[in-house]
Image (tube, helix red, strand yellow):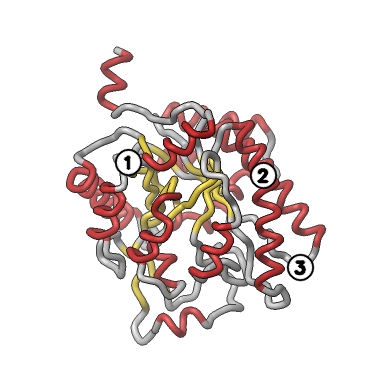
Amino acid sequence: MRISVFPKGELDALVKHKSMTVFQWIALARTLPVEGLELYSLFFEDEDDGFTASVGDALADAGFAMPMMCASPDFTHPERDVRAREHDRQVEIMHITRQLGGPGASTRVLSGQRHPSVAIEQGLDWATENIQSLIPLAKELDITLAIENHYKDGFWQYPEFAQKADVFLELLSRIDERAHFGVQYDPSNAITAGSDSADFLDLVLDRVVTMQASDRRLAPGATLDSLRSSDGTIGYSPDLQHGVIGQGLNDYHRIFSTLSTAGYDGWISIEDGVNGMDEMRASVEYLREARDLYFGGSTALRVKAHEEARALAGATSLNQPSIDTARKANA
């Protein structure tokens, strides 16, 4: 298992205020004992190929992989032209993912926002159509589309269309592809959708290709019911607070035990740092201890179910040896 980090606490500085550059974030992340950085599609808004190449150079210089690209396409928007633009932008991000992450890197894909005028069946049809249309490109680039059980993009007005487990599972069942499409499992998002996060993992376990790790707690006086009713607020509800992994609502003992037993030895990306880098470091240390405890200290990459699907499809293996073994082989 390898550990990545996502700059959740720096997104406003990186995207909204532009007071931090991606290169500054990469430099800051060098202080963390992790193997990769998960990046965000809005870092590459209105940027050219030269910028992307420079980001790749900075990642390489820092010794980081780029295993996961966070993207938030809105495939359930009621306007056809908007859905088309969202599709085209996702295509661009998939190419950037391949450029920075290489074969097997994942691009997150979502259903879209829960627009009040869009009925469930219609939204499912639109989301399915758009995701299916992207799979041939994922095969061509040899990357993986990873659909997240999502709560809400920080820059969205409405929560995720497929936030609820029944809608998410219905969408997942409509897409048979397993070699270049799978689930990005986020335990905290399962809780906000009304599910036990470990129970939800059992439902999608055979399709998990990547994972985001965070932990959430409710603000004093808040309830999960009040959180789920906040449908019209830009960004995240103030009732939902990020914290150090292992100190919130998720049962990580059961989650990691389930993953390791199923042969998941892939990327886990930490979504933390909202309350500062000290909490991000504490979350990294928690994941490093979990790697020793549940994954035998492995820094290899092998996701059993995904490997089996790729083998059936005739795709090459994405297995990678442990980092120490690879270094000795290249010495």
Residue 15 figure quarter: bottom right
Between marks 2 and 1, how big is the CA–CA gap?
A: 26 Å
Instruction: Tell me, yes or no, if residue 39 can be seen here.
Output: yes
Indicate the position of residue 93 as horizontal and vertical percent values. Answer: 63, 42
Tell me residue 5's x, y (percent).
39, 47
Q: Earlier in the sequence, mark 2 or mark 1?
A: 2
Q: Identify the residue under disc 2.
A: 134
For residue 49, above or below residue 258: above
Looking at the rendered structure, the secondary structure element under dot 3 is loop
Q: Are marks 2 and 1 in contact (CB under 8 Å)?
A: no
Disc on the earlier residue, 3 or 2: 3
Residue 244 position by quadrant:
bottom left
Q: Give left or right: position of 46 versus 248.
A: right
The amino acid type found where label 2 is placed reads: Leu
Q: Is residue 21 visible?
A: no
User: Marks 1 and 3, Cα distance to the nearest angstrom?
Assistant: 39 Å
Instruction: Name the quadrant of the N terminus.
Output: top left
Q: Quadrant of the C terminus?
A: top left
Q: Residue at x 62, y 40 (%)?
A: 94
Q: Secondary structure at mark 1?
A: strand
Residue type (three-letter) at the residue carrying disc 3:
Pro
The residue drawn where x is 46% and y is 76% is 238
Q: Callout 3: few (<14), some (14-19), or many (20+) C-alpha neighbours within 10 Å?
A: some
Task: Name the residue beneath numbered marker 1.
Answer: 265
**Viewed as shown, does residue 320 lie left or right of 7?**
left
- Label 3 belongs to which residue? 78
Give 320 or 273, whichever is nearer the viewer.
320
Residue that appears at 57% across and 33% down: 98
Answer few, some or many: residues within 10 Å of disc 1's Cα (few below 14, many 20 plus, some between 14 and 19).
many
Q: Residue at x 22, y 59 (%)?
A: 253
Callout 1 amino acid = Asp
Say whether residue 208 is left or right of residue 175. Answer: left
